[in-house]
Every structure is written in C-alpha cells, then in structure tokens.
Image (cartoon, rainbow, N blue to C red):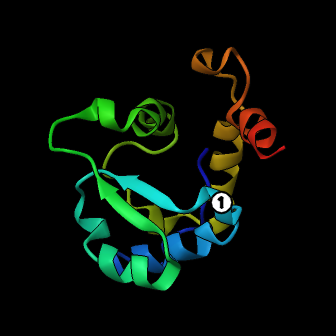
Amino acid sequence: MKNGSALGGYGAVAMNKALAASMTTIPAQLRKTLTWDRGKELAGHAQFTLDTGTRVFFADPHTPWQLPTNENTNGPLRQYFPKGTDLSRWSAEDLGAVALALNNRPRKKLGWNTPAEVFSERLR
C-alpha cells in the first residue's frame, strides 16, 4: 500500500523526515521493519532507525524479486509520474490523490481486491 507525504526537499534528510512522518500513520505492529532498494535517498537509514525504531533492510543489487510490491507499483505509478519526475513540484494533495487512486485500484495479484481492502482486512 502506498502512502506518505510529499518529500518537501531532496536527499536523505528530506526522505528520513517524510518517511518517519508517514510511518506514524501505520499501526506499530506493521512498522517494525522496512525493506528498501539501494537508492541513495535512504543513505540516512541508521538515523531513521534511531528516530523511529524501524529496522531497515536492503535488497541485494539487481534482485527486483526481493521488492515485488515496489516493482509491481512502479508501472502504475509511472502512469502518473514518468521516471525522473521531480515530485517536489507536486502538492501533498496531488500526491495523496495518486496514492488514493493506486490504493483503490484492483490488482490481479490480490484476487482483484484493492490494496486498501487487503490492508484493512489484515488490520482486522
């Protein structure tokens, strides 16, 4: 499930701040760990772990199967934002509308349920 606010800047510090804020909207039992690709935007992962208590793991290089949700979301996300788009030019409301649309789009992998439906069911 995609969620989160606009970065409000660029780089690891902005990423830590935005990601930490987003994590507070997720129940504690679901934010114990985070698996990330090897991008430089999470270079401050040690500080993020100290600030949030969320352990960060990284996928091995060139192993997209270790991040299936990420990879399966990139295609639909690119329908809204082409690769390389500077997200700082979009408002939090704009990004939230895209997240809402993606979270409410049925997925074959989920038995044609939406990510929002599956997330709600798992919380229950």
Label 1 Cα neighbours within 10 Å, binned few <14 / some 14-19 / many ≥20 = few
In the figure, residue 63 lies in which quadrant?
top left
Left or right placement of residue 97 versus residue 51 in this view: right
Q: Residue at x 69, y 23 (%)?
A: 106
Question: In the figure, 74 relative to 88: above or below?
Answer: above
* Nearer to me, 30 or 100: 30
Left or right placement of residue 102 versus residue 18 in this view: right
Q: Which residue is drawn at 38% across and 52% down?
A: 35
Residue sitting farthest toward the right: 124
* Nearer to me, 99 or 85: 99
Kind of element beneath mark 1: helix
Q: Work out whether residue 94 can be spotted.
A: no
Residue 39 picture location, percent across and down: 24, 58
What type is the residue that disc 1 sits on? Answer: Gln
Residue sitting farthest toward the left: 61
Q: Work out whether residue 111 can be spotted.
A: yes
Q: Which residue is drawn at 15% across and 43% down?
A: 61
Q: Can you identify the residue that label 1 sits on?
A: 29
* Nearer to me, 70 or 34: 34
* Nearer to me, 50 or 65: 50
Residue 87 picture location, percent across and down: 45, 61
Question: In the figure, 33 relative to 124: above or below?
Answer: below
Left or right placement of residue 83 versus residue 75 in this view: left
Question: In the figure, 70 relative to 107: above or below?
Answer: below
Q: Residue at x 68, y 14 (%)?
A: 111
Residue 45 picture location, percent across and down: 32, 73
Residue 124 picture location, percent across and down: 84, 43
Q: Quadrant of the N terminus?
A: top right
